[in-house]
Amino acid sequence: MRISLSISCTQLLLLVLPIGSGGLEMLGIDGPTWVNSGETVELVVKYDVGRDAIYSVKWYKDGGEIWRYVPSDKPSFKNFEVPGITILDSSRPHKLVFILDGPKGSGVYKCEISVEAPTFYTLKSVHNLTVVVAPSGAPEISGVKDYYAVGDIVDLNCTVHRSKPAADLKWKLNGVQVSGSMISHKKSIFHESSGLETSILGLRFRGDAEDFPGGLARVRCDAEIAGGVWSNSHAQALSGGSWTTSTGTSVELCPDSIVGIFAAFLLRRIVRESLLV
């Protein structure tokens, strides 16, 4: 029995030459992870083509092609416009050089390298890049009342407006980080036009006498971005609870009493001044 076998030269080469054997090797992309708007960034790809020849080197951002090098094309380099970055002429097959313009420069950058025939073997590597845009101000605490009686509900919001990435928020009560049960809500609002995010963290608890030592509860909202690339905080003194006289008598601060209001005002002012020191 005779078997007829027809194999093309290309197929024979593919059978004889193992894919990647002594050829293309992708070693990864070096570059920053957190950057500021306006900075010039270099993403450097490390690779080894071995015995192969390059067919193309292509760079992508979030799946869309932004730069390519094809030696057989004339010209061999080509840029593609994309919001948030301006690619510079100093870019080369092994490095992408660009200027960041706002938060839309954030994304997943990918380099894809292909070698020449017969294999057209292709490898890729990715790198995450986030443009840090700090908010214009410190965290804002809202929902504060003039006075809290023992048993009243304290219901506050901490807000950090328009940053990139979204700020990570934490509440502290009298210097101690609050438990998860005291967090009423957590949300992030994405602003489509700017690519920025607003972070909100709610604090809600029933005020006990021990929450107001000396007639004041000290709440603080801490905010940070990108693991501390930017950080800030806002402290607030809440008047309420009760205070102890020189004879050891516990007195409830009554908001309807002129003396109570004046005492609460003085205590709050003293603490606020001490927080600013």
Image (cartoon, rainbow, N blue to C red):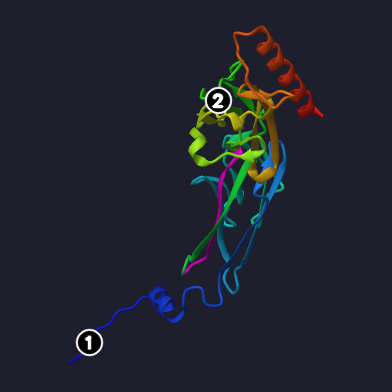
* Rendered residue at 55%/26% (across/down): 157
Q: Position of residue 64 (x, y in %)?
A: 50, 44
In this orientation, which residue lies closer to the viewer: 44 or 89?
44
Q: Position of residue 84 (x, y in %)?
A: 61, 35
Q: Position of residue 191 (x, y in %)?
A: 53, 27
Q: Amino acid at mark 2?
A: Leu
Nearer mark to the viewer, of 2 and 1: 2
Q: Is residue 88 visible?
A: no
Q: Amino acid at mark 1?
A: Ile
Find residue 248 and report its image quarter: top right
Q: Report which residue position mark 2 lands on.
A: 156
Image check: 1 left or right of 7? left
Q: Which quadrant of the rendered structure holds the C terminus?
A: top right
Magenta range:
105-118
Image check: 5 left or right of 200? left
Find residue 29 and report its image quarter: bottom right
* Rendered residue at 55%/73% (across/down): 23
Specify the label residue 254 is tagged with.
none
- Magenta region, mostly helix, strand or loop? strand
Q: Is residue 142 above or below residue 30?
A: above
Q: Report which residue position mark 1 lands on.
A: 3
In this orientation, which residue lies closer to the viewer: 74 or 163?
163
In this orientation, which residue lies closer to the viewer: 17 or 37?
37
